Image (spheres, rainbow, N blue to C red):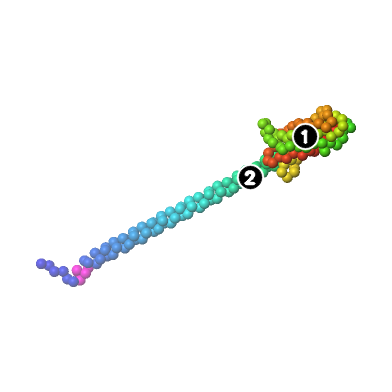
Amino acid sequence: MVRQSPRSARRTLAPVTLMIGVTVLGAAGCSSSTTVKVSSAASSAAAAAQSLASQAQSAAQSLASEAASAGQSIASQGASAAGGLGSAAASAASSAAAAASSALASIQGGLDATGDVTLGEVSAGADGRSDVTVFVTNHQTSANHYTVQVDFKDASGSLLDATVVTVPSLAAGQTADVTARSNRTLSGTVKASVGAALRY
């Protein structure tokens, strides 16, 4: 049996120890590389999630802005349409009043007869227009013709429409009634008043 000297045994163990050290260092290096890769992937995922959240928030804000803009546009159009309708109604009322005044102005020798005229209550006719009964009493000693302008107004007193009715040859002391009807459909509270009345 051959015995190795202690020095020879130390020379044999040295390479083995070196190999083990290299192996351990290699394993440590792999672990560090894997950690870096995992950390980088996590960072990329977080960045992607943040980007998606930012895009979603931007899209939501854009939709909200578009909805608000659309709402304002609709409101503006509604106000414009309402203003247009109001202007058209005022124009129609003005035209009707002018036509009624012209009809009375064409009467020659007419005398004021508003004291001979009374009105009933305004009601809605079958066609949706406003009706009111006009009562005319001839307080004179001879027969007279009567022409009456009836104004239709809203609750605040603004003119809505005007029309003219005529009672021909009413005998002295007699009373007649005739229906005055608006030229168009009137909405809301409608009242009637005598705009003018002439006998002749």
Horizontal side of 28 relative to 9 (left or right) equals right
Q: Amino acid at mark 1?
A: Phe
Residue 80, quarter of picture:
top right
Residue at horizontal 47%, vertical 54%? 50
Q: Note whether residue 74 is visible.
A: yes
Nearer the observer, 135 or 40: 135
Q: Does the magenta segment cover residue 9?
A: yes
- Quarter placement of the C terminus: top right
Q: Give the residue at x 33% y 62%.
A: 28
Image point (22%, 67%), residue name: 13
Residue 71 is situated, as x and y percent measured from the top left of the image, at 60, 45
Q: Quadrant of the N terminus?
A: bottom left
| Residue 150 versus residue 12 in the image, above or below | above
Q: Is residue 38 magenta?
A: no
For the point 29% across and 63% down, the residue is 24
Label 1 crowd (10 A; few <14 / some 14-19 / many >=20) = some
- Could you tell me how far apart the alpha carbons at marks 1 and 2 are, in whole angstroms? 46 Å
In the rendered image, residue 121, in percent from the top left (x then y), is placed at 72, 38
Q: Main secondary structure of the magenta part?
A: helix
Where, by quadrant of the figure, is residue 89 drawn?
top right
Residue 121 versus residue 91: which sits nearer the camera? 121
**Along the line of sight, the residue nearer the viewer: 150 or 51:** 150
Residue furthest to the bottom: 6
Give the mark, 1 or 2, whose residue is nearer the N terminus: 2
Residue tagged by mark 1?
135
Q: Is residue 38 left or right of residue 152?
A: left
Q: Which residues are magenta?
A: 7-11
What's under tag 2, amino acid-wise? Ala
Q: Which residue is mark 2?
A: 75
Residue most extreme to the top = 169
Mark 1 lies on a secondary structure that is strand
Mark 1 vs mark 2: give the one in front: 1
